[in-house]
């Protein structure tokens, strides 16, 4: 936004300091006039003592005092004005020095340098509180930018793979007219389906990150039952038993997104189970002011150091996926984004006997933030 040039804050503060000092001096001199000079009579008084010979003693009147007082008042006001301007300029510069550092950091951030920090020294005051808040914002922005760049690179790589495979299949089919057309179409359909799934997952992840969705009352117990019923054919095909337990757990959010959250968790638990057999346990409940959705599955033993990385986009647990439902590596990343968009959390824990426990904790219906509250923030 273009703005016309104006006086600096330092100049405004200097003029304010000088003006205040001159005004205070003028008020002080006015007090002297009102409460002192006004009681001096404006007549010439000559004290003639009968006991003493010679001329009488001269006593100055109000006019005499005013003539002596006025020049000194003028010089005093000039001194206060000059002192106020010089001292105010110096004091304003000292006070605004932290603001210069904050402005410099802001310009660097606008130019793309998010690694710079103000690190303002000294005791806590308004400027240092602003500097600390700005440093925290820069740190968060730097982390988000790095995550987005990593996500974009991974997404480009993941999308490029099915497109490259499609091109290869088409080239092979064009060079070999006798190739089985049905087999080629089947493989192209599989590759295309994976590309579509990946694109839809990316769009869903973006929607969850923005937090742009209507909010309503959602019972997680009903969502869990709907999810289990939907994924029952997949569980039967893999001989996995899915059980749902728990009472009502009302949250506030998007039914579609929370259904996708539960679907991703249960689907992840089914396809990352043992090659044959195994169980998936889904439970809902209330803990304090929050509601909880827990999904546990049997399966291979997991390295505890691997578990925190499973929520990163395109990260897959090595050796955990069996069959053709490997997914696109965004399932748990989407779950985490949906949970955070609903002001909740996702926690993963490796089970001692093998398998994984995923726990989603969301604010309950009574403690949920209002719809306008920014995603990722909680009321303190």
Image (cartoon, rainbow, N blue to C red):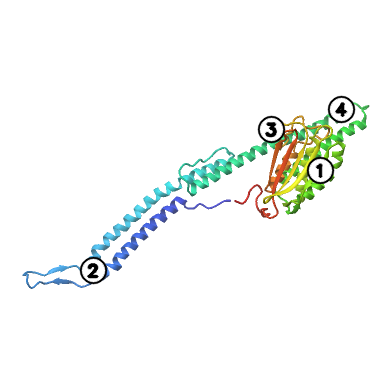
Position of 315 with respect to 88 (left or right) is: right
Label 4 CA crowd tier, 10 Å (few <14, some 14–19, many 20+): few
Q: Which residue is mark 1?
A: 243
Judge depth for marks 1 and 4 and give the one in front: 1
Judge depth for marks 1 and 3 and give the one in front: 1
For the residues marked 2 and 3, what is the alpha-carbon distance in whole angstroms? 96 Å
User: Counting residues from the N terminus, which is met first, the one under dot 1 or under dot 2?
Assistant: 2
Helix, strand or loop under label 1:
strand
For the residues marked 1 and 4, what is the alpha-carbon distance in whole angstroms? 46 Å
Q: Which residue is mark 2?
A: 63
Q: From the viewer's side, name the closer residue of 98 and 240.
A: 240
Q: Which residue is mark 3?
A: 304
Helix, strand or loop under label 3:
loop
Judge depth for marks 3 and 4 and give the one in front: 3
Using the rendered view, name the quadrant where residue 202 is placed: top right
Say whether marks 1 and 3 touch (CB < 8 Å): no
Label 3 CA crowd tier, 10 Å (few <14, some 14–19, many 20+): few
Q: Position of residue 21 (x, y in %)?
A: 37, 57
Q: Position of residue 283 (x, y in %)?
A: 76, 45
For the residues marked 1 and 3, what is the alpha-carbon distance in whole angstroms? 25 Å
For the residues marked 3 and 4, what is the alpha-carbon distance in whole angstroms? 44 Å
Q: Which residue is mark 4?
A: 172
* Mark count: 4
Q: Can you say whether 337 is above or below 315 in the image? A: below
């Amino acid at each position: 936004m273009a703005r016309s040039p104006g006086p600096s804050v330092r100049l405004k503060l200097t003029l304010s300091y000088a003006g205040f000092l001159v005004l205070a001096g003028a008020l002080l001199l006015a007090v002297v006039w009102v409460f002192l000079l006004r009681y001096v009579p404006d007549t010439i008084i000559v004290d003639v003592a009968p006991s003493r010979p010679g001329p009488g003693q001269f006593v100055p009147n109000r006019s005499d005092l005013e003539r002596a007082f006025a020049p000194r008042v003028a010089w005093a006001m000039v001194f206060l004005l000059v002192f106020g301007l010089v001292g105010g300029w110096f004091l304003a510069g000292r006070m605004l020095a932290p603001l210069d550092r904050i402005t410099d950091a802001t310009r660097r951030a606008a130019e793309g340098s998010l690694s710079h920090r103000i690190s303002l020294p000294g005791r806590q005051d308004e400027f240092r509180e602003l500097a600390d808040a700005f440093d925290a914002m820069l740190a968060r922005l730097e982390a988000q930018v790095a995550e987005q760049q990593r996500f974009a690179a991974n997404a480009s790589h993941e999308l490029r793979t099915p497109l490259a495979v499609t091109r290869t299949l088409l080239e092979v089919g064009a060079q070999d007219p006798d190739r089985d057309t049905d087999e080629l179409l089947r493989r192209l359909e599989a590759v295309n389906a994976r590309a579509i799934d990946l694109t839809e997952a990316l769009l869903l992840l973006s929607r969850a990150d923005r937090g742009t969705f209507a909010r309503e009352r959602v019972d997680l117990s009903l969502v869990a039952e709907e999810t289990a019923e939907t994924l029952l054919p997949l569980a039967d095909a893999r001989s996995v038993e899915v059980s749902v337990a728990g009472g009502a757990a009302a949250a506030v959010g998007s039914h579609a997104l929370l259904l996708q959250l539960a679907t991703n968790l249960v689907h992840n638990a089914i396809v990352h189970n043992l090659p044959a057999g195994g169980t998936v346990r889904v439970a809902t409940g209330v803990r304090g002011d929050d509601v909880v959705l827990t999904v546990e599955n049997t399966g291979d033993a997991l390295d505890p150091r691997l578990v925190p990385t499973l929520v990163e986009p395109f990260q897959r647990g090595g050796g955990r996926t069996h069959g053709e439902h490997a997914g696109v590596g965004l399932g748990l990343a989407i779950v985490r984004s949906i949970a955070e968009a609903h002001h909740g959390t996702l926690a993963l824990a490796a089970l001692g006997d093998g398998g994984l426990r995923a726990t989603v904790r969301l604010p309950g219906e009574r403690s949920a933030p209002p719809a306008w509250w920014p995603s990722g923030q909680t009321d303190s």
